[in-house]
Amino acid sequence: MPEPGLPLFAVVGHPNQGKSSVVSTLVQDDHIAVSAISGTTRQAHSYRLLLDGEILYELVDTPGFQRPRQILAWCAEHSEGAAQRPAALAAFVERHRDDPRFADDCALLTPVLAGAGIVYVVDASQPFDATFEAELTLLSWSAQPRLALLNPMAEARFEAEWQAALQQYFSLVRTFNPLLAPFAQHLALLRAMAEIHPPWRSGLLRSVDALSQQRDARHQQAADILADYLGSVLRFSIHLPVAGPRDQLRATGIAQYNRELQRRESALQSRLAELYGHDKLDWDSEWQPLRAEDISDARQWRAWGLSRRRLASLSAGAGAASGLVLDAATGGASLMMGALIGGTLGGLAGGFAGRDALSFELISRVPGYEEWQLGPVSSLDFAVALTGRALRSWYQVRQRNHARRDALALKPQDLSQWLDGLEQKQQVQLLFWLRKLLKRPLNEAESNQLRLLLAALGEQMESPP
Amino acid sequence: MERSSSGRAFSLGLRWLAAQDAPRTAVRDWRAFLAAAEPLPEPRRLRLARLWPLLALLNGPLALTALMLWPQRSGVHLLLFLLVFVFVPLVLLAWTALSALVSGRGPWWRLLLSHHDDRVIGLWCARQALLNQGLFCIAGLAWLWLALLTRQVIFYWSTSVTAVSESVAALFGALSLGLLDVPSAAVVRAAEAGAITGWQGAVLADSHQWALWLSQVVGLWVLLPWVVLLALCQWCLAQRIARWPEHNQHLRLLFAQAREPDVRYRALQPEQPPVEPAGHDFPLVTTLAPEPGFRWRLAAAGAGGEDVTLGADDQRSDEARVRTAARRLRRWYVAGHAVPTGDLADLLHLHCASGGEPQLVVLLNEGQQDEARLDALRHTWGVFLERNRLPLTLQLLRQGGGVDA
């Protein structure tokens, strides 16, 4: 147990109500055993939030109640009035600590009797009955600060009934879905926990601040990883010896290139998952439909990018921005022809994306020694598609709560939706930097610009569709 | 060459830049991250770049020696010396320092050291360039004095054109900023140059004064700014190295990957092994012959006249009901949503102890029709019966089956 005065909460309730899911989501740990099978948690497990080594609060995941009605009856017999009930509860635990029949109940009650605040979790899709009443009565007898969470695991048919019952026992009742609640709601829950016991307030509010800052830092770092990934993947090329017909060499090279792209994409996914603490994420099953993808077939990857029309309009803007640099260099003597020509060429490049995804050229660095070079990426369309896929990977780990163990459904059109949330200028800038990347590597300052744009795009992922 | 702490930190940073992966163990801060690079090999190019000042030490005497190749070693030496050892170093110093400190660019040979282009590497290269330029001048001056003492070179300034002499004297005065005494020029008339003898001796005597003056001018215009700029660059370099991840994306990513988070949750107990559904094959039925039974946590509204409702009251009342009806009833109808708990297990044990033969029927609800949920339900009940040592039969009845739920 932490030092006296430090916030301590026990997540308690009936078996299979999602207690471990709540804990898993709050402590951002996907190692916590979560399943639809009742009785998965057999022992209490504690998790501490540390800030530079200092404990901010502790959360205890507990097994579910097994025999609440019997405990209630025992305590009622062993207490003569309200004042003696907490002591009776403690006496029950003391006496039955080694009784295997009450092992789960004692594991649940021990942290509560040690001074933990109570977070009672219940699935609102089931009716309220005497068993739950016994649990609530027992918890109220502990005289500890408490909060109830309605977990809408299925259709919350009995929510009103539960609200009415819970409000008799808890000063705060909140609805919290540990599988789907966005991060802002995690923080809101911690704030609510801060309200039920004033001495713990400052520690929990510090936790909220620290977690919020950590989240922002993770987003920034993820944007950095993505910028680095795009810089490497869009500039990647392989060299092939001149040994055979061109088409045959190209086919061999594309297979090799495809494997490398997939390897880099997997590495990106692993890094992002590690960053957000998803150690057990099963990317293979989530991305199974894409594994057979052939990058030479534009129909396969185009879905991850933008529509041709949108790409053409943004690309025209990016081209015009490039041309403006020339106009500025000539002091306006070019009569804005740079912007005009750049815009036209950009629009054409975006609109007529029929060219190959990768360049394939015979190069000769040393006279007499030619070789084929496949790559880097030459089509803006393909570059945007790769960006869309990378962003989708980010979205998967960014939005995913740690209690989730299932695979997310894939929606390739998300890039367009996220772009909608950006200002037109930012959309054009993103295309501008992608176009630049097709021509040359970005320097630190340029890469930073791209990172900021990706971070802004990431913020759109949090917006409701 | 003795390595300063920033030089050492720079070397460790370059080692990370050459590495692909972050350290295996988490590091607390940037210093620890740099220290973790100790086992990595130092880049060979850095070792070579550190030796470049030696080239400058060689170049200084070479440049001065080249001055002596001038025909007749005339007084033009002085102007050339000023050009090579004052004007060019001054321009180079200013350009190198400004580029590195203001725009973060390194000298052209930065590419030979690393393909990474950041403000730290640029500044380190610039500092190295400054070091080279300063050493070039110092080595040149040292060589000058050696040559002077061995009478290999004589510095003097003479002209037969008075106007030129005045202009040059003004230039020399400006160069010394009025702080240093400029040796006066020996004005030798052209007609006298061949006729009068002895002026060469005077020139020879003045030569040391000129050399001293030249050294002071180099010190004022080159060495003093050099020391100031070098110190400034060194200070900036230490500052930038302390925040190197902000200047280099690759390093930033590696450091972020390796860094122990400030905020983290720590589990106090070891991870619990995952629960794998075992093969509990309870039959799934769609109809069942009607029969009265115990109704565990089911709504009383659906109960028949002979049914006994349990779970709606306290445990002792339920126990009494079970004892009473133990021989008459054998079915236990349980709501699909009701997670089996110890209270139910105790009642089932009581039923057995009272001479009954309980049979469990779980009434599935709408949300429990798919296979995944059915598997989880089967496993839940299987584990429940095993843990409570209840060798009972159990059937799952689909919603809308032959028994009212």
Image (cartoon, coloured by chain):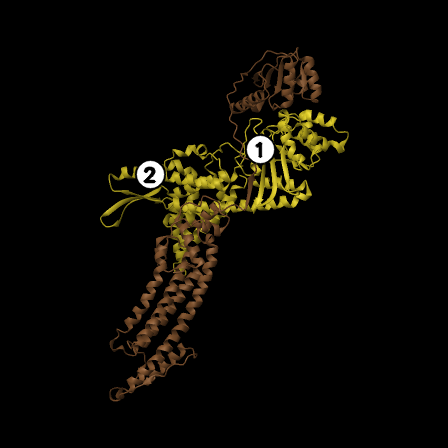
Chain colours: A yellow, B brown
- At x 36%, y 76%, the residue is B214
The x, y position of residue A140, in whole percent, is: 70, 33
Q: Chain of mark 2?
A: A
Label placed on residue B45: none
Q: Chain of mark 1?
A: A
Label placed on residue A256: 2
Q: Residues within 10 Å of mark 1 (few under 14, many from 20)?
A: many
Of A27 and A235, nearer the camera is A27
At label 1, the amino acid type is Ser
Quadrant hosting residue A96 = top right
Left or right placement of residue B21 versus residue A364 in this view: right
The x, y position of residue A84, in whole percent, is: 75, 32
When the figure is inspected, residue A12 is found, relative to residue B305, above or below; the finding is below
The verdict on a common chain for dots 1 and 2 is: yes
Of B333 and A206, nearer the camera is A206
When the figure is inspected, residue B328 is found, relative to residue A14, above or below; the finding is above
Quadrant hosting residue A68 = top right
Of B302 and B123, nearer the camera is B123
Left or right placement of residue B399 versus residue A333 in this view: right
Q: Nearer the viewer, mark 1 or mark 2?
A: 1
The x, y position of residue A139, in whole percent, is: 68, 32
Q: Secondary structure at mark 2?
A: helix
- At x 76%, y 33%, the residue is A83
In the rendered structure, which disc, 1 or 2, sits on the residue that comes first in sequence? 1
Q: Is residue B290 visible?
A: yes
The x, y position of residue B322, in whole percent, is: 68, 16
- C-alpha separation, residue under disc 1 versus residue under disc 2: 44 Å
In this figure, which residue is indicated by the disc labeled 1? Answer: A20
